[in-house]
């Protein structure tokens, strides 16, 4: 649940940051890429220094990003 919420928030907040500075399409793209980058980086850290990476965390990240994009376009 934490990964879902975190990815949703990162995507939404970064979209609203970029929305004022570029086109809507680019703002969505940039916000999705930022959120993916944060999620993957967190899993790399978990793999190397934590309890190990989990695929379900990346799935939750993807769902959070997807819901944010849906909310942005709705």
Image: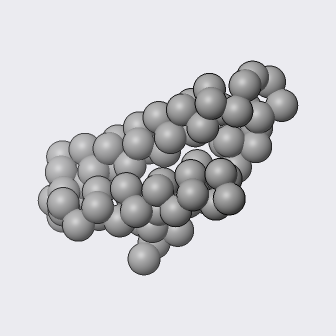
Q: Residue at x 67, y 53 (%)?
A: 72
Whether residue 10 is visible? no
Figure quadrant of the N terminus: bottom left
Residue sitting farthest toward the front: 74
Q: What colour scheme was applied to this rendering of the protein?
A: one colour
19 lies above or below 55: above
| In this picture, residue 50 sits left or right of residue 6 | left
Q: Position of residue 37 (x, y in %)?
A: 41, 38
- Name the one closer to the observer, 18 or 1: 18
| In this picture, residue 74 sits left or right of residue 48 | right
- Name the one closer to the observer, 52 or 6: 6
66 lies above or below 34: below
21 lies above or below 49: above
| In this picture, residue 23 sits left or right of residue 66 | right
Q: Position of residue 54 (x, y in %)?
A: 19, 62
- Name the one closer to the observer, 24 or 50: 24
Q: Position of residue 18 (x, y in %)?
A: 73, 32
Figure quadrant of the C terminus: bottom right
28 lies above or below 72: above
Residue sitting farthest toward the bottom: 1
- Name the one closer to the observer, 14 or 22: 22
Q: Residue at x 18, y 60 (%)?
A: 55
């Amino acid at each position: 649940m934490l990964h879902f919420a975190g990815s949703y928030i990162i995507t939404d907040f970064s979209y609203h940051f970029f929305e004022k500075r570029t086109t809507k399409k680019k703002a969505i793209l940039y916000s999705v890429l930022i959120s993916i980058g944060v999620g993957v980086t967190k899993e790399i850290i978990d793999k190397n220094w934590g309890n190990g990476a989990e695929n379900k965390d990346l799935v939750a990240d993807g769902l959070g990003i997807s819901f944010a994009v849906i909310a942005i376009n709705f």
